[in-house]
Image (tube, rainbow, N blue to C red):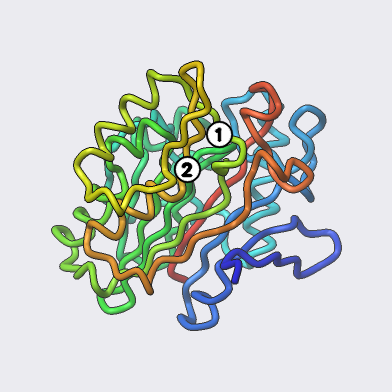
Amino acid sequence: MEPFVEYKKEEDQPELFTIKKWMDEYPGLTAGFTSRLGGVSRAPYSSLNCGLHVNDLPEDVVRNRERLADALGQPFEAFTYAEQVHSHEIIVVGEQDKGKGRLSRESAIQAKDGFITNEKGIMLCAQFADCVPLYFYDPVEGVIGLAHAGWKGTVLKISMATISSMTHTFGSRPEHIRAAIGPSIGVCCYEVDETVASRVREVLNEMPELEVEGVLNAKGDGKYMLNLQELNRILIRQAGILSSHIEVTQLCTSCRTDKFFSHRKEGGSTGRMVAWIGLT
């Protein structure tokens, strides 16, 4: 069953996808992913672009971000953004970071792609347009995490780094952590060259052969189809999270440009979705 379920409370609100199973099971947790629908931006960013770095009008982006907060019934001041750089650097987000980056790039958390906190009232946000959003929640210790995993972050094992930060900082145990892999470009659409494939192969060579079937599929002429979602699922499982605690979407951002922005499909000129997670 698809873990990301369409959520639209009112007719004039943005169309969102929430991790419904988590939110039903854990009151006070909110987690999900925006669509491209229900905002104020104009083409090629129409209409719910939440990225300040894509040459959209800043005032439209801020309004879209405010619309997300309104739709979730959360204060806009809680939404916390970073300048993402395809790294595996993790930051522990505290009260002093709350609300950073929501109004400008200059005020954002700098050069980080993974975020964890145990504080209520902070909404962790990351931006996407094909890369893989990774969500983490430890219901025992009350810890949340969010990571941005493009191919670079994936092979740098940002998934494992986020889980490790949760365990070392807050005492989370992997067997208690829930993980979710959100809407992103699928193996159906993600063609990569030998440069990327060689880096992926280095990671795959560290794993048992049966674990990696279907991750990297040769097309010929030095081209491959990469299943970035599955590679992250394997890494998350290797970090100790139970298979039964990992939710994986079937939504491909490249296939579904009616719902999502896709950097690859739209030639780089497009908007960004937001993945969010917070303890209210």
Taking the image as shown, residue 271 lies to the left or right of residue 85, namely right
Taking the image as shown, residue 47 lies to the left or right of residue 146, namely right
Taking the image as shown, residue 214 lies to the left or right of residue 154, namely right
The type of residue carrying mark 2 is Asn
Q: Nearer the viewer, residue 276 or 163?
A: 163
Q: Secondary structure at mark 2?
A: loop
Residue 268 has which mark? none
Picture coordinates of residue 275, whole percent (x, y):
53, 51
Picture coordinates of residue 130, whole percent (x, y):
57, 38
* Callout 2 crowding tier (Cα within 10 Å): few <14, some 14–19, many ≥20: many
| Image quarter of residue 266 | top right
User: So how many labels did they put on this image?
Assistant: 2
The type of residue carrying mark 1 is Tyr
Residue 93 visible: no
* Callout 1 crowding tier (Cα within 10 Å): few <14, some 14–19, many ≥20: some
Q: Which residue is mark 1?
A: 190
* Residue found at the far right of this picture: 11
Q: The N terminus appears in which quarter of the rendering?
A: bottom right
Answer with mark 1 or mark 2, whichever residue precedes in sequence.
1
Q: Nearer the viewer, residue 268 or 197?
A: 197
- Image point (27%, 79%), residue name: 140
With respect to residue 41, does 170 lie above or below?
Answer: below
Q: Secondary structure at mark 1?
A: loop
Q: Which residue is mark 2?
A: 227
| Residues at circles 1 and 2 in contact by the CB criterion of under 8 Å | yes
- Image point (50%, 39%), residue name: 131
